[in-house]
Amino acid sequence: MTDRDEFARVDAELLARGFTRMEFDLTKIEQLLDLLGSPHRAYPAIHLTGTNGKTSTARMIDGLLRAHGLHTGRYTSPHLQTVRERISLDGEPVDERRFVQTYREVAPLVALVDQRSAEPLTYFDVTTAMAFAAFADAPVDVAVVEVGLGGADDATNVLHAGVCVLTPIGLDHTEWLGDTLNDIAWAKAGIIHKGATVVTAAQDEEAARPILERCAEVGATIAREGSEFGVLRRAVAVGGQMLTLQGLGGLYEEVFLPMHGAHQAQNAAVALAAVEAFLGAGTQRALDAEVVRDGFAGVTSPGRLERVRSAPTILLDAAHNPHGMAATVAALEEEFSFSRLIVLVAMLADKDVRHVLELLEPIADALVVTRNSSSRAMPAQRLAEIAAEIFGEERVRVAATMPDAIEAAVELAEADLEGELSGVGVLVTGSVFTVADARKLLKR
């Protein structure tokens, strides 16, 4: 059996656990990690939570740490094309053979925990344990770990990391985390443990209060964007932006970030402060500015205003809630001067669909709606009904499948332009699943 066949079998076994099944109980993951010999205690970690920007910030932290000569493990979710993306070593997803080997080492102990429990371990529980085991086996110098959902009860919260990062917190996953920013921030602040250093993006007052209270409760040190660090200046540049960042340890000028939008500049400031905190930089010591520039220059974040085609330009962006879509729209208005923009949208039924569409309405000449591959996807016809109330029926087109939707969006973008495509764009957005589905078709 080939590595690919073995990987396909493992992938299927993981999926059989229910890709979207959730349990907020750390008991089973703790039992599993105990049986594995506590691999998550073999290295220090930087732990990230927040509503938007976690994966991009994790990738920036990873890049900065590697620029400083450290071997890194990175665990993020969800993935775009393969589950292997969730577990990266030194910036690259583990290969099929290593993924299978890690699974085979973990699987007998997973079965043992399952036998003892009323409910089996979740897909996320098992991939989390696999990541921690792979990092210990590598071995890595540091793990960069993104929370799956929330914080306090997330499977990754066994880490008790020395550096905790909070990206901007907004209203999302309210069915699990609570209906208010206060409730959601309390859930996310649960990753802060005794003695940690906390790096937080600027937060609404309602979200900031629980973070500060949690820090006081456990004796954590906090660094806040806008107070101890932040973005001092940013300018649009070819392929991204040029930043001046105030870090914990000093000023970092002429930092090129090959990503678009003020939100990505904010993520860069947060990432820099987190790495400074991890490496011990502060008021008495700055990091080497050239090393910082090298670290940021190589950062990518697939599915975050990612250009996958030209003429017409096709951008993929995984914004799936109002907070994220507002940032995407701001970046499009600032950095892309489209004369005509068609937006292709597919969303999950449990998201704030109406608010997201209202944010898109001013920038979209037309909207193509379809359904993505998630079992939680909103039916295309229902999405079209909501869209018609906001855009008007004449600006909304329905497509049954993603290939049909892409074709329709490109046709609409090219309509009446007589071959001049330089100012024409298509934005594919609304969900990570939407971007993943489109990326398989557009990115070879």
Image (spheres, grey):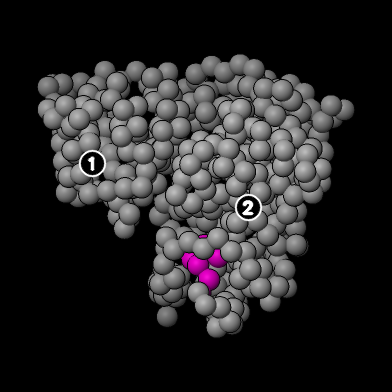
Mark number, residue 152? 2
The magenta segment is: 120-125
In the shown orientation, is residue 409 left or right of residue 86? left
From where the camera sits, is residue 108 visible?
no
Residue 217: within the magenta?
no
Instruction: Say if mark 1 contacts mark 2, CB within 8 Å.
Output: no
**Residue at 20% from the left image edge and 44% from the top image edge:** 382
Which badge, 1 or 2, is on the more N-terminal residue? 2
Q: Would you name the residue on which mark 1 appears? A: 383
Residue 124: within the magenta?
yes
**Residue type at the position of mark 1:** Leu
Q: Position of residue 374 (x, y in %)?
A: 33, 55
What kind of element bears circle 1?
Answer: helix
Q: Position of residue 175 (x, y in %)?
A: 44, 49
- Most extreme residue toward the right is 284
What kind of element bears circle 2?
Answer: loop
Quarter of the image where one finds residue 272 = top right
Quarter of the image where one finds residue 275 = top right
**Residue type at the position of mark 2:** Ala
Query: Is 231 drawn above or below residue 215 in the view shown?
Result: above
Give the tally of numbered discs: 2
Q: Residues within 10 Å of mark 2 (few under 14, many from 20)?
A: many
User: In this orientation, which residue lies closer to the viewer: 432 or 205?
Assistant: 205
